[in-house]
């Protein structure tokens, strides 16, 4: 750069000899004369104002605090940190999307399992209805089946145990529905927290863009200051040449000196303003660095939050698997009870021939029991319709939370 010495003059180029009478220095443009060809007894040297101005500018520049290179290095580090945070943000978005997809698949599997459990519950309810019918049939035939009933109390207790298992199954299904509702609420809170963090990251990225604009403004300001110093030196050089060309006019030399002093004073004032502005800009950059550090803390908090969410989901899945195993065991026991009921039906079929006389007298009792059975069936159908409506509402709510947005 011309300003900082790319076109420096040699140490002796600024000192030019003059003749004894104070005339102009020798030049290639001037023709030789007799006076210039004669040997001179003594040479007088005058100080070049360009050298003085350049040394003064160098001294002023040496007094400037060395913060520009450091500021550029800090800005480059901030750019790298910003790129790193953007990459971490993309990784976090991908992780959230993967977890959302996994939860959707898990909910679909839960719906399938719930459907299978409802089918098994329907089968169990059919078995319960068959049991009730058999109990009513045994009650109608109790007069001729005293010996048979004496051996059927154990079977009846087993059936009661099956009924208790069915009730336990229904309670477990209710617990599962409650757990799904709690999970849905937890997912809503998680998504709300993720949206908040994402908005904070976007705000920080905007702050980084603002810092880049401030850096560009600072670079432009430095360029303008350098251009002003360059113009100042050019003007000083031209005026020095004008002054050196006419030494007879001492007043003009004095005026030129005063002009240079005023110009240097203005330049010093401009440099002070520039340093003040640079200090303020440096403080703003430090504020941006503090914001970047806060962004790092927010990112660490978000990662910790995601880890806690993963741990909670893992525990929830373990609990669901345990409940599923318990339900499968209850279904197996219900199937065994169904087999026992089938064997009981076979036994009753074998004894049906001996019960024909008893059946001829039991029609009235059968009609009465049938009426009671119809009432119980109506109550059961009403309960079943209410339960199915609740399950559909839960499935619709969960589907709306996990479906495409």
Image: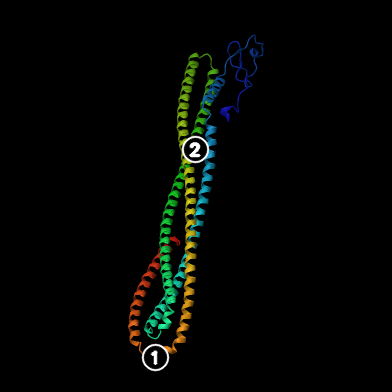
Q: Which residue is mark 2?
A: 215
Residue 132 appears in the picture as rendered: yes
Which residue occupies the foreground of this view, 334 or 378? 334
**Quarter the C terminus occupies:** bottom left
**Quarter the N terminus occupies:** top right
Q: Residue at x 47, y 53 (%)?
A: 309
Q: Residue at x 65, y 17 (%)?
A: 32
Of the two numbered discs 1 and 2 on the same chain, state the one appearing first in sequence.
2
Q: How far from the left and from the top, in percent, is residue 368?
A: 32, 83
Q: How far from the left and from the top, in percent, is residue 330?
A: 47, 69
Residue 162 higher or lower than 58, as above or below:
below
Q: Residue at x 42, y 50 (%)?
A: 196
* Colour setup of the view: rainbow
Residue 334 higher or lower than 318, as above or below:
below
Circle 1 crowding by C-alpha within 10 Å: few under 14, some 14–19, many from 20:
few
Q: Which residue is mark 1?
A: 357
Q: How far from the left and from the top, in percent, is residue 136?
A: 38, 81
Gap in angstroms between the C-alphas marked 1 and 2: 108 Å
Q: How far from the left and from the top, in percent, is residue 375?
A: 33, 78
Residue 177 higher or lower than 222, as above or below:
below
Residue 108 appears in the picture as rendered: no
């Amino acid at each position: 750069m011309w300003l900082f010495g790319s076109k420096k003059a040699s140490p002796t180029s600024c000192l030019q000899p003059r003749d004894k009478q104070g005339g102009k220095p020798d030049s290639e443009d001037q023709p030789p004369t007799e006076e210039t060809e004669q040997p001179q007894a003594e040479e007088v040297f005058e100080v070049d104002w360009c050298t003085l101005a350049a040394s003064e500018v160098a001294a002023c520049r040496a007094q400037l605090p060395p913060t520009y290179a450091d500021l550029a290095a800090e800005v480059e580090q901030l750019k790298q940190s910003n790129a790193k945070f953007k990459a971490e943000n993309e990784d976090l978005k991908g992780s959230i999307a993967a977890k959302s997809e996994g939860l959707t698949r898990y909910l679909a599997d839960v719906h399938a399992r719930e459907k299978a459990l409802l089918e098994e519950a329907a089968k169990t309810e059919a078995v319960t209805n068959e049991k009730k019918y058999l109990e009513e049939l045994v009650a109608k035939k109790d007069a001729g089946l005293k010996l048979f009933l004496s051996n059927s109390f154990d079977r009846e207790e087993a059936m009661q145990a099956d009924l208790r298992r069915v009730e336990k199954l229904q309670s477990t299904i209710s617990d599962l529905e409650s757990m799904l509702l709690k999970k849905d609420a937890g997912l809503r809170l998680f998504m709300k927290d993720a949206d908040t963090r994402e908005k904070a990251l976007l705000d920080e990225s905007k702050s980084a863009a603002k810092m880049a604009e401030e850096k560009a403004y600072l670079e432009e300001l430095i360029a303008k200051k350098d251009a002003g110093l360059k113009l100042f030196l050019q003007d000083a050089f031209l005026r020095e040449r004008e002054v050196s060309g006419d030494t007879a006019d001492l007043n003009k030399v004095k005026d030129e000196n005063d002009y240079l002093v005023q110009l240097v004073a203005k330049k010093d004032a401009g440099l002070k303003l520039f340093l003040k502005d640079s200090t303020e800009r440096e403080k703003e950059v430090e504020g941006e660095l503090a914001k970047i550090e806060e962004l790092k803390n927010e990112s660490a908090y978000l990662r910790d939050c995601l880890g806690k969410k993963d741990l909670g989901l893992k525990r929830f899945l373990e609990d669901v698997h345990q409940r599923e195993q318990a339900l499968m065991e209850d279904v197996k026991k219900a199937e065994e009870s169904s087999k026992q009921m089938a064997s009981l039906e076979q036994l009753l079929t074998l004894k049906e021939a001996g019960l024909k006389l008893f059946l001829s007298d039991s029609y009235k009792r059968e009609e009465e029991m049938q009426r009671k059975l119809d009432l119980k069936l109506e109550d059961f159908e009403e309960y079943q319709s209410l339960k199915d409506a609740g399950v559909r509402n839960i499935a619709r709510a969960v589907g709306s939370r996990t479906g495409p947005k």
